[in-house]
Image: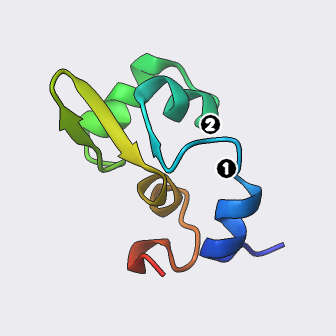
Amino acid sequence: MGYTLKNAYSVMLKHYPDVMNIEELSRALGVSTKTGYKLIRTGKITAMKVGRAYRIPKVHLLTYLRVPGADKGT
């Protein structure tokens, strides 16, 4: 089944907030927080730093997962 951005928001990551922290990102991907930080540090997932904490918009995670339309924000 191919996912569209709207479909992915409502199915793939429906239990996660629109802006995630590193723990939620790691849980969603099924990786350790160390790997989550590495994905951010290497630029594979775009994140914003607020104080000392990273905030990852869900759409950036969908872009990383290559969900169609995620890179356009539509």
- The image position of residue 68, as x and y in percent, is 57, 77
- Going by the picture, which residue comes out furthest to the left? 51
Q: Residue at x 36, y 37 (%)?
A: 39
Quarter that holds the N terminus: bottom right
Name the quadrant containing residue 54: top left
Residue drawn at x 72%, y 54% is 12
Direction from residue 12 to residue 28 in the image, left or right: left
Q: Position of residue 57 (x, y in %)?
A: 40, 51
Where is residue 65? Give x, y as percent: 55, 57
Residue type at mark 1 is: Leu
Q: Is residue 50 above or below residue 48?
A: above
Of residues 8 and 39, the one nearer the viewer is 8
Name the residue rendered at 58%, 69% in the picture. 67
Residue bearing the label numbered 2: 28
Whether tag 2 and tag 1 are in contact, CB under 8 A, the answer is yes
How far apart are the alpha carbons under marks 2 and 1? 7 Å
The residue type indicated by label 2 comes to Ala
Q: Secondary structure at mark 2?
A: helix
- Foreground mark, 2 or 1, reads 1
Q: Is label 1 in a helix, a strand or a loop?
A: loop
Residue identifier under label 1: 13
The relative height of residue 70 versus residue 49 in the rendered view (above or below) is below
Residue 19 in the image: state x and y as whole percent.
43, 45
Q: State which quadrant residue 27 falls in.
A: top right
In the orientation shown, which residue stands out farthest toward the right? Answer: 1
Q: Nearer the viewer, residue 21 or 38?
A: 21
Relative height, residue 36 to residue 15 (above, below): above
Residue 1 to residue 54: above or below: below
Q: Is the residue marked by circle 1 packed among few (<14), some (14-19), or many (20+) residues within 10 Å?
A: some
Give the colouring mode of the picture: rainbow
